[in-house]
Image (cartoon, rainbow, N blue to C red):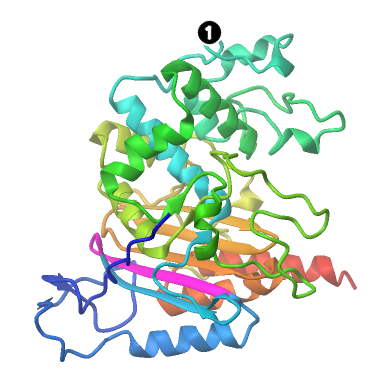
Amino acid sequence: MEFDELKTTSCVARAALAVCSGLLLLQGCSPQANVASSQPSISNPYTDLEREFDALVAENDVVTAGAAIITDGHVAWTGNFGEQAPGIMASERTLYNVGSITKTVAAETILRLVSDGTLSLDASMSPVWVDPDLQDDNRHELLTPRVALTHSTGFPNWRYFTKNGKLAFNADPGTSFTYSGEGYEYLATYSEKLTDQKFEALVQEHVFDPIGIENASYSIDKAYFNNIAQAKAPDGSFPGHYCYPDNGYCRSEGSSTPADDLVISVNDFALFLISVMNSDGYDKSVTADRDTVHVKKAEANNTILCDSTKYAQCPIAQGYGLGWEVLDFGDRQIVSHGGSDWHELALAYFDTQSKDGVIIFLNAPSNDALKVMPKAISLLDADSPMIELYQRWLRQAEAAADPD
């Protein structure tokens, strides 16, 4: 497959795009002046940011990093740092494995199918699809698209985590938060049987094509391999794309999952995030449902710990909406999702009121990436509530590695 050269979208290159003179602040950074693309002499206001981000990557064993700032619903800045592969610098064409952020693309596909009347959020999936492992458990009748999108299926994250490798309920559906890739697999299979289309085709038709996303792959396709940022195992080796160094397992070509392993460029994910901000493909009622906290997590696992936070505000609710994690401040919400695996750490979020957003993709061994993420967020959004979250995870990881 041939890859078209992406157009770099920046505050200087985009006509009529206004930029902030400083870093993004979700609390109120707004455009100050229009900048025409016919004025190439205008300096890049993000030069200092790029220099600091580049140094952060170089000094912390991050192989590749991509980032974006979205201001008022427009791409204000994107950057790619480090190497895509040995001797090949990262660029706008670099594709990043975004891990569980893949679920947001699946969720947005479902919301568009809800909007066009193809499926209902609250219809039982059992008349169309019941996993063979659940045939003898009548609780499968309680499984709905809403339950899957809000991570309340009661499933484990993956069935292979169970002793017998079979899918089973750890909790009654709809009663509690149980983060689950299996829930998304279940929903995707249901959608396929309902529409008689592969889920990847539904993603292409309802999300990628309308937005104009071309540099992304939902399935394992060797045509994209030359552009995917190469992962580095702890011993410094490259185990292969979609491979795991600890056991040698590699996902097979042509396979896909709605829950993991999407590869996409920073520029194209920024287009996707802006589309979500604008609720493209569905109406305000679906948007309100998406941005409502339907299922709460255990308080200790909240993004903001209100009794100890340094963040300026405490949300009135926090937990999962439809496919996204939501911090609800009443007049505005911060909508987010993260992704992590042995070789990557990814984060994307936006403010529903200001339509400001941040994207950070880190290709590095997970512990190295976790050390960098709080600093990377600080560079792009100094007042972000996500900084404390990743600092907390870092402390927990360090404590686990050195319990003494």
Task: Give the left or right position of residue 380, taking residue 178 as reference.
Answer: left
Q: Please tell me whether residue 174 is drawn above or below residue 35 in the rendered image.
A: above
Task: Specify the farthest residue to the front.
Answer: 1
| Amino acid at pointer 1 | Pro
Q: Tell me which corner region of the image, top left, top right, bottom left or bottom right, holds residue 388.
A: bottom right
Q: Is residue 302 visible?
A: yes
Residue wearing tag 1 = 127
Residue 318 x/y as whole percent:
49, 47
Q: Which residues are magenta?
A: 64-74
Q: Is residue 288 visible?
A: no
Q: Is residue 286 magenta?
A: no
Q: Please tell me whether residue 285 is drawn above or below residue 89 in the rendered image.
A: above
- Residue located 24% across and 34% down the image: 283
Residue 181 x/y as whole percent:
62, 38
Between 264 and 45, the one nearer to me in the picture: 264
Q: Quadrant of the N terminus?
A: bottom left
- Residue located 58% across and 16% down the image: 142
Residue 102 x/y as whole percent:
51, 47
Q: Please tell me whether residue 366 is drawn above or below residue 281 in the rendered image.
A: below
Between 4 and 91, the one nearer to me in the picture: 4
Task: Give the left or right position of residue 138, taking residue 275 as reference.
Answer: right
Task: Specify the farthest residue to the right.
Answer: 404
**Element assignment for label 1:** loop
